[in-house]
Amino acid sequence: MKKMILTFLFISLNIVITGIGASLGIKAAVGVGAWDALSQSVSTVIGIKIGTFSMLLNISCVVVQFLMLGKRFKPIALLQVFVAILLGYVVNYMYYTIYANLVIEAYWINLTLYVLSVLIIVIGVANITAMNFISFPLEGACLVISDRFKLNFGKVRQWVDIISIIIALAVAFIFQDNITVREGTFIGMLMFGPLLDRIIHFVRPRLEKFGLVYNQ
């Protein structure tokens, strides 16, 4: 019981960390990751908060897993709904409340904030990934799709990013909205993968000492 409580507390903490990083990246306004760019573009057009639309988008990824797996869908995967809701709430709170009055004119400061946001997100995602207990909804859906159709996971995840960018750009041009795919999007794509791999390898042995790495 103690281990499970510690697990949920650690997961919750890192979801909050990820949400803080994501909202900071949005506030920097130099472009966001492909998945976040999709959320930001569509949420602006339909008039709901970014975190709320992100929440719905991530929950839809859990639905995809349930529909594709059927009876093989593990109940523990429903915790991804918790991940989606908490992450969306943190993004909304940070972006619309904490960062509401934050205005930075200098481009280089915004770019620095974006790089910092990527580092924060990577730390949160790496800690949760290293635990091997639960995945983020998008990665969980991509994994199910890759297993179902015998595709490479990395390729599926990459195509999701490509499709997200295409939709985000299309929405921006059709509705004459701000373009959320910018230099930061590509900086994030270059930084995220290599950093995530390194940090996972760094934190996993340390998490193992606390019994927070699960073998599934």
Image: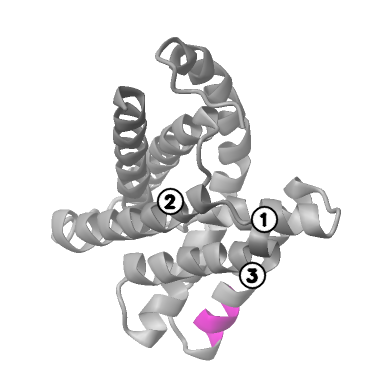
> Residue at 45% of width from left, 78% of height from top?
42
Q: Helix, strand, or loop for circle 3?
A: helix
Figure quadrant of the N terminus: top left
Where does label 3 land, which residue?
67
Q: Amino acid at mark 2?
A: Leu
Between residue 74 and residue 91, name the one nearer to us.
74
Under mark 3, the amino acid is Leu
Which amino acid, mark 1? Arg
Crowd rating for badge 1 (residues with CA inside 10 Å; few <14, some 14–19, many 20+): few
In the rendered structure, find residue 72 and report the number of the disc placed on it. 1
Residue 99: give x, y in percent of width and height. 19, 55
Which is nearer the N-term, disc 1 or disc 2? 1
Give residue 96's position: percent from left, percent from top.
20, 64
**Residue that appears at 45% across and 13% down:** 206
- The answer to whether residue 195 is left or right of residue 4 is right
Judge whether residue 85 can be spotted in this image.
yes
Q: Are marks 1 and 3 in contact (CB under 8 Å)?
A: no
**Residue 181 horizontal/vertical position (percent):** 53, 64
- Determine the residue located farthest toward the right in the rendered image: 150
When the figure is inspected, residue 159 is found, relative to residue 17, above or below; the finding is below
